[in-house]
Image (tube, grey):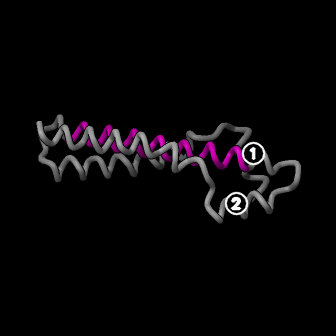
Amino acid sequence: MKTAKYIAAAVGLSVIASPVLAASLNSKERARVARASARDRDEVRYCLLQAKKGRDKGTVIGAAGGAGVGALAGGNLGESLLAGAAGAVAGRVIGKSEGTNSRCDRVLARNR
């Protein structure tokens, strides 16, 4: 039961921290916005932020799901953390593609 409390605390902390991390672009993404054509800059920025939010959300959901499955399967703390890490990686990959719609995909492809 103690393991479940640690996992729940880690998931709660990551859910609280994820919107803060998704609110800004890194230098590479800011440079991509600056390179974009003038008519597409706002859309490129919006789409990059949406993709980042999708990746972060997928990471949190995957980590929580993996850790939950590890705990329910009767694993110890190390096994549950390993399952959470694997779930986070899988969730990030899935969230990366699900964070944007087809319009954003076209805008980002046009402005590489």
- The quadrant holding residue 27 is bottom right
Q: Position of residue 105 (x, y in %)?
A: 70, 45
Can see residue 98?
A: yes
Horizontal side, residue 13 vs residue 81: left or right: right
> From the image, which quarter does the N terminus lie in?
top left
Callout 2: 10 Å neighbours few (<14), some, many (20+)?
some
Q: Amino acid at mark 1?
A: Arg
Q: Residue at x 32, y 37 (%)?
A: 65
Q: Majority secondary structure of the magenta segment?
A: helix
Horizontal side, residue 57 vs residue 108: left or right: left
Question: Which residue is under mark 2?
Answer: 30
Callout 1: 10 Å neighbours few (<14), some, many (20+)?
few
Give the mark nearest the N terminus, 1 or 2.
2
Q: Position of residue 75 (x, y in %)?
A: 13, 44
Judging depth in this view, the residue of 1 and 104 nearest the camera is 1
Q: Position of residue 111 (x, y in %)?
A: 78, 56
Horizontal side, residue 71 vs residue 20: left or right: left
Tag on residue 106?
1
Q: Residue at x 86, y 55 (%)?
A: 37
- Is residue 97 magenta-colored? no
Residue at disc 1, secondary structure = helix
Query: What range of the chain is rendered magenta?
Result: 45-70
Q: Amino acid at mark 2?
A: Arg
- The residues tagged by marks 1 and 2 sit, at their Cα atoms, a distance apart of 18 Å
Q: Position of residue 64 (x, y in %)?
A: 32, 39
Q: Residue at x 27, y 41 (%)?
A: 9
